[in-house]
Image: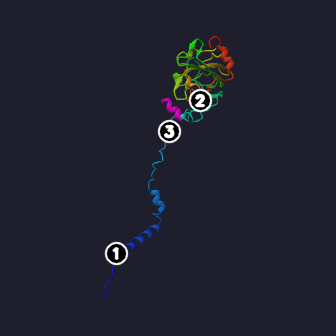
């Protein structure tokens, strides 16, 4: 009598092939589905996404703001989409101060236009403590039906100079607030349908020339202008004349 030879390995192979064929035919465990169930593995060279920075957050330090927001172009409408960058001498359509210190209704439409810059070591009887004053003409125009005023620092608004290294300098630091050239002494409330000239001044180190000025309006929106490193602008002659004897 002949003895039957059993081949367990062959039997197991047949069973496995049958099982795989059955799974494939039902469409419940295809290679594509298996891949979709496997978590993606991040390559060691692939960086994680950077956290978003709220450019309207006034608690940001200036270096962080410059690094993350200085190049961000936004609408300038609600302060949530970054600062709006304009060319030097271009007009920003802003919202006026919500709580003007000199009376009148809050808000209002106010066009703001910085257009001319002068650099001076001394001005109007004062000497720059840090090396040089940057004196900038600004035209404020109330374009709505109500009076309007620039937003003030007490509201979290107003002007700052942002140096190339990211340092922020507030308008009027040291004796810069005393610089009021003749013909450019406007300030405060601008009556509806009118405009006036004013100047803003910053006490800077020589290395901080050619920075950026930033204005935060009554709605929290930020507008920026890159300031020329050399004196320039259409009001240059008038501004120097207004400083005669003290320039």
Q: Which residues are magenta?
A: 58-68
- Residue labelled with disc 3: 52
Type of secondary structure dominating the magenta stretch: helix
The single residue placed furthest to the bottom in the displayed view is 1
Front-lying residue, 181 or 36: 181
Q: Tell me which label, 2 or 3, sits earlier in the chain.
A: 3
Q: Residue at x 66, y 16 (%)?
A: 240
Front-lying residue, 12 or 176: 176
Q: Horizontal placement of 9 versus 152: left or right?
A: left
Q: Position of residue 156 (x, y in %)?
A: 52, 25
Q: Rounded to the nearest whole Å, what is the CA distance between mark 2 and mark 3?
A: 21 Å
Quadrant location of the C terminus in the rendered image: top right
Q: Horizontal placement of 125 versus 50: left or right?
A: right
Q: Tell me which label, 1 or 3, sits earlier in the chain.
A: 1
- Residue labelled with disc 2: 224
Q: Rounded to the nearest whole Å, what is the CA distance between mark 1 and mark 3?
A: 61 Å
Q: Residue at x 43, y 68 (%)?
A: 20
Quadrant location of the N terminus in the rendered image: bottom left
């Amino acid at each position: 009598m002949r003895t039957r030879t059993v081949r367990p390995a062959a039997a197991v192979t047949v069973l496995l092939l049958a099982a795989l064929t059955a799974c494939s035919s039902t469409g419940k465990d295809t290679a594509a589905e298996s891949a979709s169930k496997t978590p993606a593995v991040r390559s060691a060279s692939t960086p994680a996404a950077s956290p978003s920075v709220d450019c309207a957050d006034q608690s940001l330090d200036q270096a962080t703001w410059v690094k993350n927001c200085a190049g961000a172009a936004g609408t300038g409408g609600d302060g949530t989409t970054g600062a709006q960058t304009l060319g030097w001498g271009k007009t920003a359509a802003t919202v006026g101060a919500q709580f003007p210190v000199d009376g009148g209704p809050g808000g209002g439409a106010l066009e703001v236009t910085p257009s001319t810059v002068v650099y001076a070591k001394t001005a109007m009887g004062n000497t720059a403590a840090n090396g040089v004053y940057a004196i900038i003409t600004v035209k404020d125009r109330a374009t709505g039906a109500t009076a309007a005023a620039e937003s003030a620092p007490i509201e979290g608004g107003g002007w700052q100079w942002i140096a190339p290294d990211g340092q922020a300098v507030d308008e009027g630091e040291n004796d810069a607030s005393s610089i009021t050239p003749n013909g450019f002494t406007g300030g405060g409330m601008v009556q509806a349908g009118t405009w006036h000239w004013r100047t803003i001044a910053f006490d800077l180190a020589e290395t901080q020339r050619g920075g950026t000025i930033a204005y935060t309006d009554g709605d929290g929106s930020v507008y920026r202008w890159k300031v020329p490193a050399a004196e320039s602008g259409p009001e240059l002659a008038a501004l120097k004349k207004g400083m005669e004897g003290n320039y």
